[in-house]
Image: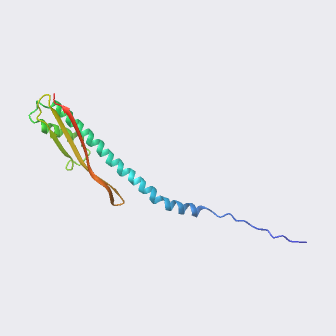
Amino acid sequence: MTTGKHTTITMRSERGQAMTEFALVLPVLALMLFAVIQFGIAFNNYITVTDAARAGARKAAVSRGTANPARTTEAAVRASAAGLDQGRLDVEIKSNFERGTDVTVSASYPYSISLLGLIVGSGRLTSTTTERVE
């Protein structure tokens, strides 16, 4: 009678491998997520600055008869950009406020995009709108 040897193949769990791969990929995914969030904040601020300049120019176009049209215009810009830090928002108005002339309103706001404490981009978001004084 001959006896045969049986070979046993054991299946190892791949749980450790999946955890290791996840641990290696997680920092890259987190960095990408934070980059998207930072870019989204900067883009939202840009949209706000653009809308504020447009609102200010429209207000300037129809405020010729007010006592101080430049102050009225700046107030409209700041009201439209209420979500931004007003101390860091710069507003510039160029016009003599005479009927038929142009009024140019510029709004500017600083931005910086940082990832893990490192600033990867910074500058000023600026938008300018021109309208005709009515």
Residue lying at the far right of the rendered structure: 1
Q: How many marks?
A: 0
Q: Is residue 117 above or below residue 80?
A: below
Residue lying at the far left of the rendered structure: 67
Residue in the foreground of this view, choosing between 54 and 129: 129
Q: Is residue 100 above or below residue 123?
A: above
- Asked which colour scheme the image uses, the reply is rainbow
Is 31 on the left-hand or right-hand side of 92? right
Residue lying at the far front of the rendered structure: 101
Which quadrant would residue 65 be assigned to in this image? Answer: top left
Is 96 on the left-hand or right-hand side of 108? left
- Which x, y percent locates residue 132? 18, 30
Which quadrant would residue 18 be assigned to in this image? Answer: bottom right
Which quadrant would the C terminus be assigned to in this image?
Answer: top left
Which quadrant would the N terminus be assigned to in this image?
Answer: bottom right
- Which x, y percent locates residue 55? 23, 36
Q: Is residue 113 above or below residue 102?
A: below
- Give the residue displayed 43% in from the left and 56% down from the top: 30
Residue in the foreground of this view, choosing between 108 and 77: 108
- Give the residue displayed 41% in from the left and 57% down from the top: 31
- Which x, y percent locates residue 118? 33, 60
- Give the residue displayed 20% in from the left and 37% down from the top: 56
- Which x, y percent locates residue 21? 53, 61
